[in-house]
Image (cartoon, rainbow, N blue to C red):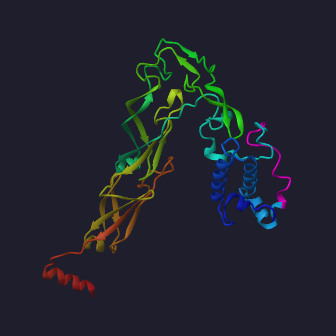
Amino acid sequence: MGKDYYNILGINRAATQEEIKKAFRQKAHQYHPDKAGGDEAKFKEINEAYQVLGDQKKRTQYDQFGSAFEHGQAGGGFQGFDGFRDFSGYTNGFNINMDDLGDMFSGFGDVFGFGGGGHTKRARRGRDIQMLLEIDFIEAVFGVEKEISLKKTVKCDHCHGNCAEPGSKIETCQVCGGSGRVTKIQRTILGNMQVQTTCEACGGEGKAYNQKCTKCHGSGVCQEIANLKVKIPAGIDNGETIRLSGQGEAGEKGSPAGDLYLQIRIRSDRRFEREGYDIKSKAEINFTQAALGDKIEVETVDGYVKLYIPDGTQSGTIFKLKGKGVERLQGRGRGDHLVEVIVKTPKNLSRKQKELLRELEN
């Protein structure tokens, strides 16, 4: 098989990809050439082993054919950053994956912008807020406008979010020239490298303030009680959420605000029950009304309506009041109101009443 890559990394052949990566990091720490007692040849061998075993396709080929399949593929120079090769003589024959080195790079910050996200410090978008809002059953059916109050981070009304005391000057940072980044020479496992880090003078903003805002102390935001009017759409159901874009926490230094999510809780109503866009209720009638028929008043979300009960109606019969249910979202009509009729069984009957009922059985 040639070189035993598993043995080089000190792992068994059943090792997972995570175990392979962990072994590589430990060995690379131990043998990298810049450390006392480091071994450049051993470091190259460890990297060669990882380039094969750390790639599932190459690992499968290696397990089947041995290290011969890899000849001619392990070289070619360092490829971690486009356009950069051969740092201090240690990269010839390397092909190092920067993500796999992980914490080996901790301590020298953002390399060529790596992990830094650009030249200036990005102000963070404001946080999202989640809030529970309770409404009545009828309000959910027809919709309602509610006024809510919440304490949140808002844009500073003294400096209007620009972080400077009104009337004071905002100038370009003299240290970084407005870029928010400074370049330093950093010694790494790959030799001396140019490293870009956040400018300490301006904190990455690229700006210098003659005087920061006396209210927000240069953050551009402050805590206040905000009052909002919210339209709850007709037909909303229990547990559904309304998203109010830009009504969350204000962002730092003029960056966009987060969103406000209102989770709706609908209070129960003893008169009605909801099923989708339909409303269900019950109506009691007596034995005579069930036997002979009648017109009764039934309460709906629109008020009382007349319901015709035909003769011979059985207990549990359901009648439909079309279009008397919940408003459908986006104005697509309404559901129905379903009325279940419950026939009350008479109690404490007199002798004559019992005789009359027995006659009805015959």
Q: Quadrant of the N terminus?
A: bottom right
Please tell me whether the stretch drawn in magenta is mainly helix, strand or loop: loop
Q: Which residue extends farthest right?
A: 72
Can you name the residue that lies furthest to the bottom here?
362
Q: Name the quarter where the C terminus is drawn.
A: bottom left
The residue closer to the viewer here, 175 or 205, is 175
Q: Nearer the viewer, residue 51 or 308?
A: 51
Q: Nearer the viewer, residue 18 or 178?
A: 18
The picture places residue 7, in percent across and down from the top left corner, at 71, 62
Q: Can you say whether 266 is above or below 226 in the image?
A: below
Describe residue 278's horizontal placement relative to residue 65 as left or right.
left
Q: Which residue: 59% across, 26% down? A: 199
Q: Is residue 185 above or below residue 15?
A: above
* Residue at the far front in the pictured view: 37
Comparing 162 with 360, the one in front is 162
Q: Is residue 69 magenta?
A: yes
Q: Image check: 198 left or right of 266?
A: right
Where on the picture, by quarter, is residue 195?
Answer: top right
Say how many tags the image has.
0
Q: Is residue 148 above or below residue 321?
A: above
List x then y, in percent, for residue 359. Answer: 23, 85
In the rendered image, residue 102, in percent from the top left (x then y), is placed at: 63, 46
Range of the magenta residues? Answer: 68-84
Q: Residue at x 66, y 62 (%)?
A: 11
Asked whether, in this view, residue 291 is left or right of residue 355, the answer is right
Q: Position of residue 133 (x, y in %)?
A: 38, 45
Q: Quadrant of residue 337?
A: bottom left
At horizontal 24% and vertical 75% (from top left) the residue drawn is 345
Does the magenta segment cover residue 222?
no
